Amino acid sequence: MKGKSYWSLLIVGLLPMFVSCSDGQVTESDIVNRVNEIYGKVAEVYDSRADRGLLDSLYCSNDWKTLVKIVEDTDIEGNEPGFFDADYWVMGQDWHDLGVDSVVVEQLAEREARASLNLHNCGQVTRVRLLMVLENEAWQIDNFIDVTNGLDWKASMNDYVETAALMLQTDSIGLVKEDANVEISLHADYPTGGATAVVVDSIRRFIAETMQGDVRLAGEPEQLLTSVYKKSYEDLKSERDEMLKDVSDVPPFSITCEIKKGTDTKKYVSYLTTYGEYHGGAHGTTYATGVTFDKSSGRQMGWNLLKDTDKPEFRKMIKEGLRQYFAAWDADVSSDEQLKDFLYTDADIDNLPLPAWAPYLTEAGMLFSYQQYEIAAYAAGIPSFVISYDQLKPYLTEAGAALIK
């Protein structure tokens, strides 16, 4: 969004420590004048067309420009959707009526300085701190800090690059074959690198085991898929042939397995599995669950993320999670009695059994899921819910807390 801009600089809060430029030393007024020059150009550039690259080339340090290039290259490689969804020059995605005031020099040394100012944009005021360095006899910006919103741009970029280097790289593998007897569909986000070798190997083995394949072929995706297909086909066809001895009209038996990468962070990666089988009858069976891998060890993490799960306060969160799930169906479960009517269990409503499958980590919190018939009718689907990390904090083991820190 472009609009008419104004620009005013008010120099306030300067300490009485000015040094004459005649002896070659820098004064606070030199820094303020430089800020004035820089942000005057910002207004000019954004009043015509935004050009972050031009401003960087003129007014940013070599270290800053190098880091920005690394981040942009990381985006191109596809490790993340993109880091620069906002602009550090205007502290936002849009710009309108740009302006600054209340410029203060907070610190001044021979070749380093720190200044802060109020940045006006789109009717909002953001306090911005600039870290500046002297390069080639000119003061250049080495970092932007959004004080109002607690965002250190340089630290965030470094963290982004570090995280991207540890992101798990995957390739989509799959096999779909069907005939009058058997239908088989296999898909997986197969690890190819990017993270530690130990976690890549662990996830490959997990994929092989989940597909009920030969783990010795975990490192050979095409051979693994072929072996899973052959074994599954033989088993399903044999089972269907037995049923055909007593029933004349039998639909094809089937297996569907989809294994997808979920949340991927510096410390862990989650994998989500949806597995379905049909062996005749009114309908098939499906389960959907996930598992978390510790990137440092490759270890699968589940219930060992939690402690004290038998405590009444923890079981209350389970009850409320189920209430949340059924309420999303517009079901009236406002009372415990109404919630109990939806559940297939004789357990006390305040001490419901935990899911058979362990929870796994997501961006929003830990996801718990009950499988078909485990705690509710088939029509209820797979009751699942997320409990936030803030709520779970007292119940995290040391290993669990370390992964989400």
Image (cartoon, rainbow, N blue to C red):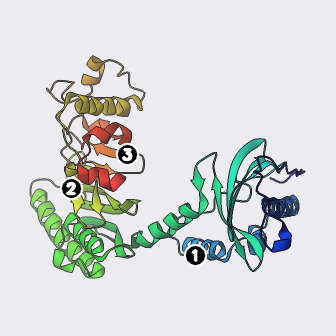
Give the residue number, with chain letter if any, for mark 3: 365
Depth check, front residue: 148 or 167: 148
- For badge 3, the amino acid type reads Gly
Where does residue 123 sit, x and y in percent of width and height? 78, 41
Q: Earlier in the sequence, mark 3 or mark 2?
A: 2
Where does residue 356 sit, x and y in percent of width and height? 18, 45
Real-space CA distance between mark 3 and mark 1, rounded to the nearest whole angstrom? 30 Å
Of badges 1 and 2, the one in the foreground is 1
Q: Quadrant of residue 279?
A: bottom left
- Which residue is at 14% across, 67% downward? 235
Depth check, front residue: 126 or 34: 34
Tell me the tag on residue 70.
1
Of badges 3 and 2, the one in the foreground is 3
In the image, taking residue 365 as reference, residue 317 lies left or right, namely left
- For badge 1, the amino acid type reads Ile
- For badge 2, the amino acid type reads Val
Contact, mark 3 vs mark 1 (Cβ under 8 Å): no
Where does residue 51 sit, x and y in percent of width and height? 78, 67
Real-space CA distance between mark 1 and mark 2, rounded to the nearest whole angstrom? 58 Å
Real-space CA distance between mark 3 and mark 2, rounded to the nearest whole angstrom? 43 Å
In the image, taking residue 340 as reference, residue 131 lies left or right, namely right
Tell me the tag on residue 250.
2
- Which residue is at 85% across, 58% downward? 43
- Which residue is at 19% across, 51% downward? 304
Q: Quadrant of residue 349?
A: top left
Q: Is residue 52 above or below residue 328?
A: below
Question: Tag 3: Cα neighbours inside 10 Å, few (<14), some, or many (≥20)?
Answer: some
Q: Secondary structure at mark 2?
A: loop
